[in-house]
Image: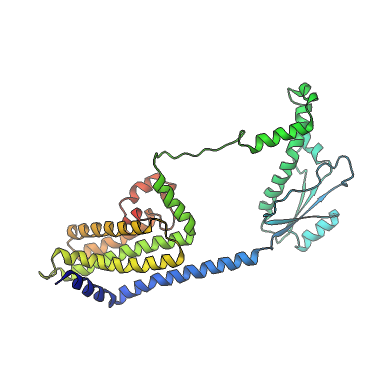
């Protein structure tokens, strides 16, 4: 039998298999599910725009008071909270009690003096709405904003009154202290982090990590599932070959290769079409998928020669597929956290694709 006829005959035989057809349909079903989840997430994001939580704050005293040096909480435009300054403490308490505001912060007019003495406990009074689920996060945001505003003032106060160089501070203006504070806290000269990998050549790892990041969590997981399904198709091909290998006619090498590769090719074409629709293919996808097919073909061919029993092969299949899900980055890249996992993953073929 000529090779192209053998491919065509094998293709027809697999397409007519109910289980194989069901697995093929699983690929577009996963694709549609991915699209629907993305659409629902986008709708939630759209509904969430402009619905930032309200946070009230009130400064005791008036802005005309000479001691009222801190009169505003600085907030960036992309903040997830809307900060509202109340005109009175009663207004703040009413807003929080009614649930209109998540939290309310009453900041005393002498906050600088309180902090300068080192008394940090209960210097800011916080009112929390009973319905609030974000108070802990809001606290961190507010205190970070307060710190950014108060830190230069407290630094200047410390240098002039308590430091070893207090006598030398007479000739240095407050503006200079503030300028130096900004410089040393924002230019990276005080704190900087440099992360280096122990590997000298990580370009391939970086490319794959970047591809997983751009595809998103769902896209990356879907690509991993497609890889496992392609391998599963190869396993089905080996099982079908076991069924016909008893005949001397079908025991030849080309029948073995065709039965293994044809189901994987069918799955690969379908999976690639789905991934193109979802735009989750990395730049090196064509080379990756061809290499993956060749690796699977070589692996399954050798395995089919080693394991002669169909029942033993059936028992090995779920164990190996489970190992693929655990040790290769189908859902999560455990090797990034546990180095020994990456060493084990090389024995599972999806590792070389993902």
The residue at the point 77 percent across, 46 percent down is: 124
Of residues 187 and 106, the one nearer the viewer is 187
Of the 4 image quadrants, the one containing the C terminus is bottom left
In the image, farthest residue toward the left: 248
* Location of residue 118 in the rendering, given as x and y in whole percent from the top left corner: 75, 35
Of residues 119 and 242, the one nearer the viewer is 242
Image: 236 above or below 190: below
The residue at the point 31 percent across, 74 percent down is: 19
In this orientation, does residue 157 appear? yes
Q: Quadrant of residue 265?
A: bottom left
Q: Quadrant of residue 79?
A: bottom right
Residue 103 shown left or right of residue 63 in the figure: left
The residue at the point 69 percent across, 37 percent down is: 182
* Location of residue 109 in the rendering, given as x and y in whole percent from the top left corner: 84, 43
Of the 4 image quadrants, the one containing the N terminus is bottom left
Q: Quadrant of residue 146?
A: top right
In this orientation, does residue 118 appear? no
* Location of residue 210 in the rendering, given as x and y in whole percent from the top left corner: 46, 52
The residue at the point 35 percent across, 59 percent down is: 286
């Amino acid at each position: 039998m000529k090779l192209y006829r053998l491919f065509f005959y094998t293709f027809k035989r697999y397409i007519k298999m109910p289980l194989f057809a069901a697995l093929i349909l699983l690929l577009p079903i996963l694709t549609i599910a991915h699209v629907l989840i993305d659409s629902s997430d986008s709708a939630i994001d759209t509904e969430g725009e402009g619905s930032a939580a309200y946070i009230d704050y009130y400064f005791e005293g008036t802005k005309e008071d000479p001691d009222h040096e801190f009169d505003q909480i600085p907030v960036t435009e992309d903040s997830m909270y809307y900060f509202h300054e109340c005109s009175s403490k009663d207004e703040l308490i009413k807003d929080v009690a009614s649930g209109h505001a998540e939290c309310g912060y009453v900041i005393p007019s002498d906050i600088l003096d309180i902090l300068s003495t080192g008394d940090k406990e209960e210097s800011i009074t916080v009112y929390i709405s009973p319905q609030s689920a974000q108070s802990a996060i809001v606290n961190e945001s507010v205190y970070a904003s307060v710190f950014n505003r108060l830190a230069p003032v407290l630094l200047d106060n410390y240098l002039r009154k308590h430091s070893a160089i207090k006598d030398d501070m007479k000739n240095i203006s407050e503006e200079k202290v503030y300028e130096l504070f900004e410089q040393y806290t924002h230019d990276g000269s005080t704190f900087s982090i440099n992360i280096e990998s122990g590997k000298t050549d990580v370009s391939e790892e970086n490319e794959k990590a970047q591809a997983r990041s751009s595809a998103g969590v769902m896209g990356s997981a879907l690509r991993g599932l497609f890889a496992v399904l392609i391998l599963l198709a190869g396993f089905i091909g080996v099982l079908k070959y076991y069924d016909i290998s008893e005949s001397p006619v079908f025991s030849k090498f080309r029948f073995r290769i065709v039965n293994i590769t044809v189901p994987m090719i069918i799955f690969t074409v379908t999976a690639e079409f789905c991934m193109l629709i979802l735009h989750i293919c990395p730049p090196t996808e064509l080379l990756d998928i061809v290499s993956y097919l060749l690796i699977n073909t070589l692996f399954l061919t050798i395995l089919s020669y080693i394991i002669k029993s169909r029942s033993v092969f059936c028992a090995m299949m779920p164990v190996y597929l489970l190992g693929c899900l655990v040790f290769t980055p189908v859902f999560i890249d455990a090797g990034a956290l546990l180095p020994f996992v990456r060493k084990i993953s090389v024995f599972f073929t999806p590792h070389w694709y993902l």
